Amino acid sequence: MQDFNQQASGVRAVHDTSSGLSAGFARGNPPDLGCLNYNYEIVRFQERGAFSDLADLAGEARIAPSIQDLIDQYPTYPGRTSVIPYSMMAAAVLYNEEIFAEHDLSIPTTYSEFLEVCGALEDAGVTPIYSTYADPWTVAQGLVDYSVGGRLDVAEFFEQLRAQGADAGPDAPVSFSRTLREPLEQMLEIAAFSQPGAASRGYGDGNVGFARGDAAMYLQGPWALGEIATINPDARIGIFPLPMTEDPEDLKVRVNLDLALWVPEASNAQEPARELLRYLITPEIADAYNQDNLAFGVREDAPAVQDARLQDLQGFVDRAAFYQGVSQAIPRTIPFENYAQGIVTGQSLEATLRTLDEDWARLARRSETEA
Amino acid sequence: MTTATTPPRTAEAPTGVSPRSRPAPRRRPRTDRVYLWFLLPTLVLFTLSITMPAAMGIFYSFTDSVGFGEFNFVGLNNYLVMFSDPAILSSYGFTIGVALCTVILVNVVALTLAIGLTSKIRAKTALRTIFVMPMVVSGIIIAFVFQFIFANTVPATAQALQLGVLEESILADPDLAWISIVLVTAWQAVPQAMLIYIAGLMTVPRDVYEASAIDGASAWKQLRSITLPLISGFVLINVIIGFKDFLGTYEIIVGLTDGGPGTSTRSVAMTIFSGFDNGDYAYQMANSTIFFLITLTIALIQLRLTRGNARI
């Protein structure tokens, strides 16, 4: 930021770290340049054309096509490049290399191997998985997303679901009840290998517990690595994708666009904002940022990650063997994370999926009457 | 006919009173302009920060606005959908249930403490100060502290004592998590209710107790037949104000359970708030309009009842 200010004449960029994005848009006073997590909150601005067209800059950004697809999996504004991806995070199962070595376990590549590993750990008196049900997002982004993403094509599922419009529901040809049931049943099998009392443990507890070696595996993203390293600098952590089928070729990792750039239509400083954007996407700046933050670059020629723990995932990223989590494609009006928490803490899977289908259909009906 | 029974509507002074001692006929005193100036800042602030946003919110509840950009009018659609939305209906059920339980708990505890703290005991002032402390701590801090207690301390203690029941945190149990919310909300709300009760108990004249003691009334009888009837106005205020406040419980739930496990502890306020970030602005505005009408009704009932009953 300081570098940019020194180079650019007449413009002073200020880093605004405040949240309250909705309020900013509601007041007609959003930030001039957004550089934020690409999630459903952003999608709904994008969908309604709140972002200006960045098509001319997209060429300069040289986004890898597989990563551009991630943007297009969500509802976009037709004929417009609303956001430019900046940084991608890849998440999978974190595991304690020492515990695995101690018990002579190798990384599982099929679902049955995975269950065997869990069984072996349990027999040896080691908790296989540290779970943190008290924080609903951890359940949704970890257990649920990995289980579903490892089994089916998430993007395709949502495309079909959206195509059904208001005809969606528990009994529709494509529904949460039909499609997610099996992966989530598998998820419950996996979740059963969690430590006792997982229901009252949160994200912070999980980082501490996993860093201390209380469990062999932890279903969290690379964002947890920093904290884990602070708690136990000697912890040797590796990462592998959660196998959900019997075919090692099916292995995939969960990704999300941790940062994406956009310039609101309502900005009154679009030119300087685009200038700053152009500066941010220069390879030196973007690559340095992504290395520092354990993230993957989004350019076609982005360098591979340097971090040893993440290098195992590079191959999956290169092959585009990745998916965006199912939890990230559900409008936040539906309390999906809470539903996920409910399922792992003993509520009926079938009833929860039915509720989810009904919520989805209600939302679809509502937006249809509104349109 | 009726003229015979109604007294003459004349301003004639009754006989026997000398005109001199009669107070001069007074016109309605004119309010000094200065007082209006005192009112002005509050009036302006209130209008700008409460009335206007509320009116705008009601306006948006008839649209499909997501909080920014263009919107269309959808009439009563939001309201119609709302009444068939199980998520919203269950949030009302939960909120009202919790508010009722909390109000009962708060008033029982607060009245007990108030009676204790107005009796002749040692260190009364010190104890009052201690009991009032929860009032000055921010709700979210209380919630996080209790979250730790419920998630760690209670299960650990229960395990040490082999109690069985409490060994699993009640926050993790969809059927019991609400109890933690009632307890913590009550813990925070008791002091205020207690202060109102202490003030109420001080209005009861000592001599009625003395008189009843002479008549041989037991302490329990005194409480039931003297104290409670004489402070009934205060009970009413505490119950109604408390109920109204507890309906809006937000930060304690966010800190304790964040609406979970599952959706078992999602309050109306949380549901409404979720609309701001999730593009459900207009829909949740409809929800908050209904919620506003409910609290308004309670407020009106309170005004009405306290006008007749509790003259404090």
Image (cartoon, coloured by chain):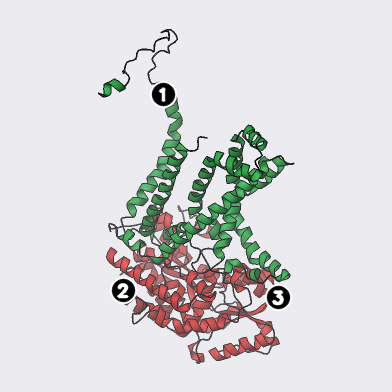
Chain colours: A red, B green
**Quarter of the figure with residue A93:** bottom right
Residue holding disc 2: A165
Tag 1–tag 3 contact (CB < 8 Å): no
- Dot 1: element: loop
Task: Report the Cα–Cα distance between label 1 and label 2.
Answer: 64 Å
Q: Position of residue A86 (x, y in %)?
A: 47, 69
Labels 1, 2: front one = 1
Amino acid marked by disc 2: Gly
Q: Position of residue A1 (x, y in %)?
A: 52, 59
Please tell me how crowded label 2 is: few (under 14), some (14-19), or many (20+) other residues with Cα within 10 Å: some
Q: Residue at x 54, y 71 (%)?
A: A138
Residue holding disc 3: A234
Position of residue B51 in the picture relative to residue A321 (left or right): left
Q: Is any atom of residue A32 visible in this view?
A: no
Labels 1, 3: front one = 1
- Dot 3: element: loop
Tag 2–tag 3 contact (CB < 8 Å): no
Please check whether the numbered discs 1 and 2 fall on a single chain: no
Give the chain of mark 1: B
Vertical comparison of A174 with B268: above or below? below
Q: Residue at x 39, y 48 (%)?
A: B54
Q: Position of residue A48 (x, y in %)?
A: 34, 63
Position of residue A166 in the picture relative to residue B174 (left or right): left
Give the chain of mark 2: A
Q: Which mark is residue B31?
A: 1
Residue closer to the observer: B71 or B264: B264
Residue closer to the observer: B7 or A88: B7
Sooner in the amino-acid sequence: mark 2 or mark 3: 2
Labels 2, 3: front one = 2
Please check whether the numbered discs 1 and 3 fall on a single chain: no
